[in-house]
Every structure is written in C-alpha cells, then in structure tokens.
Amino acid sequence: MLNKKWQAGLLAGTLLIGLLSGCGGAKEQTAQGESGQEGGKINLRLYTYGTEEAYNWKETLAAYEAKTPGVTIELVQLSEKGDTQEAFKKLDLEAASSAQMDILMFSDPAGYAQRVALGMAEPLDEYIAKDGFSVEEDYKVDTRLDGKVYALPGKFNPWYVLLNKDHLKEAGLAVPTDWTWDDYADYAKKLTQGEGSAKRYGTYFHGPQGGGWLEFLKLKMANQPQDTDFLKADGTSNLDNPTFRETLELRVRMEKEDQSSVPYTDMISQKLNYRTQFFNQSASMITIGSWMNTEIGGTDKVPLEFEVAVAPFPKNKVGDPTGLTPVTTDYVAVAAKSKHKEEAYKFVRWYTTEGQVVQGKNIPAWQGVKSEQVEEIIDTILAGTKSPEKVDKKSLVDTLVASKASAIVPPAPYQAEVYEAINEEYEKLILGNQDIDQTIRNSQERVNKIIESNQK
C-alpha cells in the first residue's frame, strides 16, 4: 500500500501545480460546461495517452455513439506522441483543476495504483456486481487494488518467447507449446554455436540495467499466481521467495556454465538491443513483451530474413499452470469527479469488451474474444510488417490465447530504489564479485532499509 506521507506530498504538489498553471487543461472546456450535458445529450470526456494511429479512436468512438444514442465521447489527447510520462503530468494537472473528467486511462500498474491512492478513480465493484460478472472470469488481467476494482483492462500485451525457426530446424527442435525454464535452458544450449566473435548464442536477456528491465530478474517469480514482484502486496520484502534464488541460479548457470546466453558485460559495454540481437541472428531466442507483434514480421529499419515462431512464457515445473506471464495493459477507469459515473462505467465496460474488437489494434484482455477474432486482429497487425508470411501465425495466436496475467502487486512509491539496489547486487554476482547467498543477503538488507526509511 502507498504510504501516507508520500501520498499527501504528491497530492499537495499536484494541487499546487494545478493552481500555478491557472487550471490550464490539456484541452479547452467544452461548451456545455462542467456538467457535460447539453440539449438532453450527455458528453463524456475520455482522457488518454493513446494516439489515433495506435488506438483507432475515430472509428471506435463513432461505433459507441451509434450504439448509444444520447451519449457522445469527447477525446482529450494528453500526448500527441503517445508519451505516457507526458500524459500522466497533464492528467494530474487536469485532476487538480475544475475540468470535467469522466473516463481515465492509465498505462501501467504504478501509474494506476498511485492515482487510485490519490482518489482519482471511482470503485467499480457495485457496477460490476449489478452487471453480474467477475473480473477474474471475464478478463485475463486482475486489476484489483486492496480488494477493490478501480479499472477494467483494455489491451493485452503478455510476455512471450520469440524463436528463430530456422535455427530450431537446424537443431532438430520443435516449436515449444508448453515448457519449463529447464527446457528453455536446454534449448539455449542446443541452439548455441561457434566461438569468439562468430559465436551465436541460444538466448539474450535484455536486463537488468540501470534499475530497469528487472523482469529479467523475476523470470521464475513472474509466472506465479501471486507475489510476483520483489515486494509483497503488504509492502514487505519478497526476496526470501525461493523463485528469486532460482532465477539468479538460472541466469548464472546459463551465462557462466552453459555459456548459452549473451554475457551481461557485452550487453552493458556494447549497449546491445534485443531487437538487433534477435533480428541479426546473434541470438536464437529472446524473452520479451508482445508489443513486438507490430515488428515480428520485420520492418524497413530491421528486416526479417528468417522464419519466426512464438512460444509461451516458460513455467517453473511441469505441473504448474501454463500461460501465466508478465502482462502490460491499459487500465480504463471512471473518474471519481465525474457527474455521469453510470454512463462512464457503461462506456468503460463496452470499450474493454466489444470495443476492443472494434478498435482492432491490440489483442483484448477480454476473455470473450474468440480465437478466430484474435487471428483476425493478428492478421491486421502482421499486414503492417514487411514479411508477415515468415511468421508462424498459429504459434503466435495460440500463445496469445493461452496467456494470462498474475494478480497485480500494487507498486510502492519507492519501487525504483528497490529495483536499483537489486540491480547493483546482481551485477556484483554476475561479474564474479559475490556468490548467490551473499547477493540475496545483501539485497534483502538493502531493500529492508529502503522500506524502513520510507515508512517513517
């Protein structure tokens, strides 16, 4: 849970900025004024970072207005570039002003949790109960915070594994459909070839680095139903979780013993990028987010010169459920200050279900989407790439359909400090300056100190 000192400070800062800005908004107030109603029609203002190119807003909103006479949706574009940080800043200014706000979109769990703590989003549990559905059954992402639902999920971007299918064929390996991290390590060994500068590695891990890309130190934590981060939901350390140790062991084994993953020192010193490592065939597999769907068939800048297959995020043990993976989504909420909460909720529910199909730009988090509809969306996405015929579409669709998210662990305001500390301790480990026991001990001590200093 977010601590009260931080919460109060952020709120005060936001309000002060709003006052100093003269309550300037991302867009001028509509003619109908604060109530959002004119001539019997209800106008709802939707605040988003999503661009027209990425979200197909004109067609999507027109479809809703045709379906719902008497309601119009006014798009408030918070960033022309789709920059989420810029969007959050403008959203906070609007929240501190007298601007009409009805529907809000948050781009990540941290941004969502922080603004829920500030009271910006309305709890949706009563509306959901009235509609007679449950979030965990209707959606692939559980958006609960402290037991309440403040948003419904829009798009669904699970992590998966991209594989060079040509390399698989050379090694006599099948495209995995249900595998473990031990299988992944075995594949990486068999796919590794050559020596020195001509060496081709079985895999490449793009992190951690600079306190970011910490997903690569949660490989065996992230495919669990609960407690998938370095901190638990109650804000205490989760570093005594055996899956943290197992992730460290896996990384050390693959780099030092098997020598099947690109060395960490190369990644840092050469400023390597996961796209080029995969597309120039320096690495046969990469574990990455499905935002790569728009690039998987190659682009003008990074062409595709081999066949690509997709596999689900590996699990820890054979008996574990298949498909649990890190996921990014849009958190679509009703603004707490909206004067038309019922109408705003109805749009949120439609947008995160049927609206995602109409939008046709992303894989929906809605469970109601059938496999053939996912395939149609994938066809549209791949059509925008240079070589869609080189993508094993079936493996991509099957992986996306099977993927599902773990429960959200509400991010702490000092999350970045925790990530940086763990990153630094990992570097000591992978550079040979300390063993795994010392790495875990040091990480635990540093993280506990960070927690304590932020609770005063």
Image (cartoon, rainbow, N blue to C red):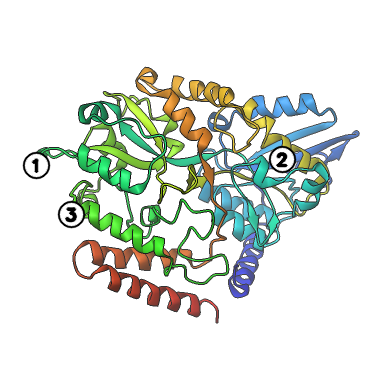
Residue 260: which numbered mark, if any? none
- Please state which of the two labelled residues, at mark 1 or mark 3, is closer to the viewer: 3
Question: Which residue corresponds to mark 1?
Answer: 195
- Amino acid type, label 1: Glu
Residue 257: which numbered mark, if any? 3
Please state if 423 lies on the left or on the right of 448 as rendered. left
SS at circle 1: loop
Residue 348: which numbered mark, if any? 2
Q: Residue at the spot x=81%, y=40% of the render?
A: 343
- Please state which of the two labelled residues, at mark 2 or mark 1, is closer to the viewer: 1
Measure the alpha-carbon separation of dots 3 and 2. 50 Å
Q: Give the image location of residue 329, x and y in percent.
A: 56, 43
- Amino acid type, label 2: Val
Asked if residue 23 shows in the view, the reply is no
> Closer to the camera, 253 or 373?
253
The answer to whether mark 2 and mark 1 are in CB contact below 8 A is: no
Q: Residue at the spot x=30%, y=25% of the render?
A: 304
- Please state which of the two labelled residues, at mark 3 or mark 2, is closer to the viewer: 3
- Amino acid type, label 3: Glu
Q: Give the image location of residue 148, x and y in percent.
A: 70, 57
Measure the alpha-carbon separation of dots 1 and 3. 15 Å
Q: Give the image location of residue 57, x and y in percent.
A: 63, 30
Q: Earlier in the sequence, mark 2 or mark 1?
A: 1
187 versus 299 height, above or below: below
> Closer to the camera, 1 or 301?
1
